[in-house]
Structures are given as structure tokens and as C-alpha cells.
Image (cartoon, rainbow, N blue to C red):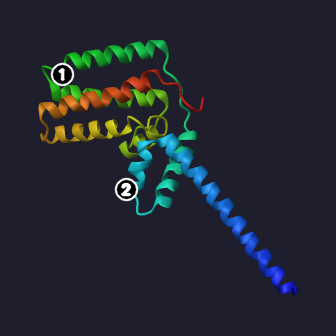
Amino acid sequence: MDAWVWIVIAIVVVLVVVALVAAASSRRRRHHLQSRFGSEYDRTVEGADRRREAERDLREREARHDELDLHPLSDASRQRYTQQWQEMQSGFVDRPQVAVADADRLITDLMRERGYPVDDFDTRSELVSVDHPDVVENYRTAHGIARRTVEGRTSTEDLRQAVISYRALFEEMLVDEPANS
């Protein structure tokens, strides 16, 4: 065979190997994101135009999250938040709208003390999704109900659901140790 045939074969082999390595790397990254984010991975992919964009968004969340200085709560803080949560829940019967607002504020205060940025809800929920992918959708739901409460567009059942949804994140964040400490 001529030399140019061997060169073409070598180039084809190299291209095939590069394609296989790239595909394997992509599968590993996808598997990592799926296992880390769970249902949040699926929600993000469904909301994006392309899977690649969604995966880039999730990797960026991880990078921003890794830059945070997260820390666990002290025992005294944990007890204080637990007491405030119990007070909020017991006030729900008489003033459910106030209880939902208090739950929203309590979650925000807890996140601030743990080291999360709290200025923007979307940023908060994205960063929380890195460590708490199973309950971040509850957080979004509860926060949406809290916003509708201000507009007077919620029922008592909606308010009850908001408190239940907030509680899922509250319980995880109350005892959770940060992943990057």
C-alpha cells in the first residue's frame, strides 16, 4: 500500500479514538451531574434549549457553590432556629399569611448564617440545589406561594403547603454539614 493510504488510515483511527474519548468524558460529566442534582438535573434540562446549555449551567452552579464559605450552625443557633420554627408553626392557625412570611424570612436568615448569599432568590435556589437537589423544588414552590400571598391570591391550603415545603429545606439546612468545609 502507498504511504498516503497509511496516513489516511492513521488519521481516521486518531479521529475515532478522539471521538470515543470525548463521548466517554461527556457521559462521565453527565452521570456526575445527574447523580449530584437528581431531579434538578431533569428540571434544568427540560427548561433549556439544549442539554449542553443545561449541563453548563449546572457546572457553573457547582463552581459558584464551591466558592462559598459555608459552615454549620452552632448548637445555640440550631436551637434558636428550631424554637423560631415551632413558634411560626403554632401561629399558623391564627395568622397563616404571617406564618408563611415568617417561614420565608426564617429560611433566608438560616441560609445567611450558613454562608449562602441571600440577596436574590434565583441565585439562592440555584446554589441550594447543589447540596439540596431533592428539596429545592419545594423551596421554589413555597417561595412562589409566599409571593402570591402578598398579592392576596392564595388559599389556606396553599399556605399550609408552603409551610410544609419550607419545612423540608429547613430540616435539611438545620443539620446539614457543608460539602466544602
| Residue 67 appears anywhere in the view | no
Q: Mark 1 points at which residue?
A: 92
Type of the residue with mark 1: Phe
The percent coordinates of residue 11 (x first, y second) are: 77, 76
- Callout in the foreground (1, 2): 2
| Residue 172 appears anywhere in the view | yes
The percent coordinates of residue 72 (x first, y second) are: 51, 23
Q: Is residue 164 above or below residue 151?
A: above
Is 71 situated left or right of 174 in this image?
A: right
The foreground one among 127 and 23 is 23
Q: Which residue is drawn at 47% across and 59% down?
A: 51
Q: Mark 2 points at which residue?
A: 47
The foreground one among 34 and 92 is 34
The percent coordinates of residue 89 (x first, y second) are: 24, 19
Q: Is residue 77 above or below residue 153?
A: above
Badge 1: few (under 14), some or many (20 or more) residues near its Cα, within 10 Å? some
